[in-house]
Image (tube, helix red, strand yellow):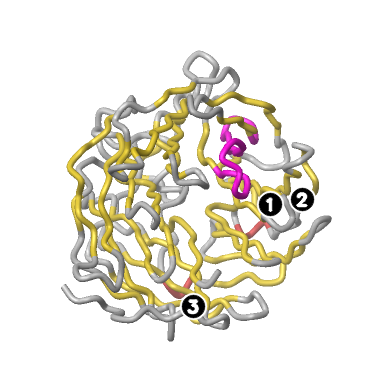
């Protein structure tokens, strides 16, 4: 297949967009939204992606918000977007138009992931390697070789190996949010892939961190991951590395707050350096890092209040007031001096942030797009 963008252009400074996944059982889609120079959002556009969504279960019923119990279901790197369709167990690659980044074009067709109920993915352009995390009855990690846009045959090709993980689910969709997979990310140097699993959220069955080394000669994952079960880790939802530091990361822990971790090399063993209770938000599950402020924002699905955590002092710095009608904060990201938060309501909140405070500057109403059920992930084009 020929490349949708034969010649990749530099990302225009004024052309930016946000993306999220609509994990709809009647057909998955990507929603793209224009991001203006003043930080505000406008002009949403939906693109169907030839896949089927599937909502995770809570107490034997579908869950409408946080339907994947995870972070990072949409990833953007350069002019390429990757996402998943949990109901059809497929992964998708799209080319982003530099002229209007709301326009995304499929590159090849949907590719089977090899597992059940994909929930999160991570990509290394340097390695040409995509990894997908699954949380269903066949839970674990699958990997793919990515031929870039502009190459002779751009697209995704399965590498064949499936790395099972001890996720205690016997059916798909999984019953959560406990006992499910949470997140998968490369470390900043792209020498290892890290996965967090949240078990029952109590000390008897704590959360796990699995680290897969990268074989630099073959640009593939080493099949035997390093497993860490540090005491005090209960229900990790997400993992976010601190800037370009391979050794420091923060996990959101839905049981109570945030966990500061230290990664040792070359062993890849994980230890906790501090557990931070965040009582002002319920179910703190999602994180977004502001590198220029060295602040990690923690969001909870039952409270709309973003909590700013000082990474150096490992303590709460401030909270941002948010309207109760936004019904909680979910997948989030930071760009420049703005924090973008996917709401529990049908919308996205935009907060202006600095080192000492934050304030709401926009609530983008997306109710015209239909049901909020299944909205997942948040990614940016135009960094």
**Helix, strand or loop at mark 2:** strand
Which stretch is magenta?
240-258
Of the 4 image quadrants, the one containing the N terminus is bottom left
Query: Is disc 1 in contact with disc 2, using a CB cutoff of under 8 Å?
Result: yes
Extreme residue toward the front, this view: 217
Determine the CA span between mark 1 and mark 2.
6 Å
**Can you give x and y, in whole percent of width and height, for residue 372 in the image?**
44, 61
The residue that appears at 50% across and 13% down in the rendered structure is: 204
Which of the two discs, 1 and 3, labels the residue nearer the N terminus?
Answer: 3
Q: Is residue 241 magenta?
A: yes
Query: Is 245 placed above or below 15 here?
Result: above
Viewer-nearest residue: 198 or 303: 198
Q: Name the residue under label 1.
A: 306
Q: Does the magenta stretch include residue 86?
A: no
- Please indicate, yes or no, whether residue 82 appears anywhere in the rendered image: yes
Mark toward the viewer: 1 or 3: 3
Extreme residue toward the top, this view: 204
Q: Mark 3 points at which residue?
A: 11
């Amino acid at each position: 297949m020929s490349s949708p963008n034969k010649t990749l252009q530099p990302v225009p400074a004024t052309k930016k967009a946000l993306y999220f996944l609509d994990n709809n059982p009647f057909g998955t889609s990507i929603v793209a939204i224009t991001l203006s120079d003043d930080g505000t959002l406008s002009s949403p556009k939906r693109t169907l992606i030839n896949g089927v969504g599937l909502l995770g279960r809570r107490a034997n019923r579908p869950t409408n918000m946080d339907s994947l119990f995870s972070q990072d279901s949409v990833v953007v790197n350069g002019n390429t977007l990757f996402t998943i369709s949990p109901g059809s167990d497929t992964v998708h690659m799209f080319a982003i138009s530099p002229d209007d980044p709301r326009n995304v074009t499929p590159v090849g067709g949907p590719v089977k992931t090899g597992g059940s109920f994909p929930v999160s993915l991570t990509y290394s352009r340097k390695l040409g390697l995509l990894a997908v995390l699954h949380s269903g009855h066949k839970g674990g990690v699958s990997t793919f070789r990515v031929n870039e846009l502009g190459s002779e045959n751009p697209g995704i090709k399965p590498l064949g190996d499936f790395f099972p993980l001890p996720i205690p689910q016997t059916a798909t969709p999984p019953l959560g949010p406990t006992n499910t997979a949470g997140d998968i990310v490369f470390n900043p140097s792209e020498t290892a892939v890290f996965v967090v699993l949240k078990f029952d959220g109590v000390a008897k069955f704590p959360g796990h961190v699995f680290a897969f080394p990268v074989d630099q000669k073959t640009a593939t994952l080493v099949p035997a991951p390093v497993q860490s079960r540090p005491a005090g880790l209960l229900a990790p939802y997400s993992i976010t590395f601190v800037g370009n530091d391979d050794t420091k990361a923060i996990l959101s822990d839905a049981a109570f707050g945030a966990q500061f971790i230290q990664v040792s090399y070359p062993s890849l063993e994980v230890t906790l350096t501090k557990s931070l209770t965040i009582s002002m938000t319920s179910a703190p599950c999602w994180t977004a890092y502001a590198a220029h402020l060295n602040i990690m924002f923690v969001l909870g699905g039952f409270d709309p209040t973003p909590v700013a955590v000082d990474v150096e002092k490992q303590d709460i710095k401030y909270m941002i007031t948010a309207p109760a009608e936004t019904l909680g904060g979910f997948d989030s990201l930071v760009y420049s001096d703005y924090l973008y938060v996917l709401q529990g309501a049908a919308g996205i909140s935009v907060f202006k942030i600095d080192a000492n405070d934050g304030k709401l500057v926009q609530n983008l109403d997306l109710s015209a797009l239909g049901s909020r059920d299944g909205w997942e992930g948040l990614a940016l084009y135009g960094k």
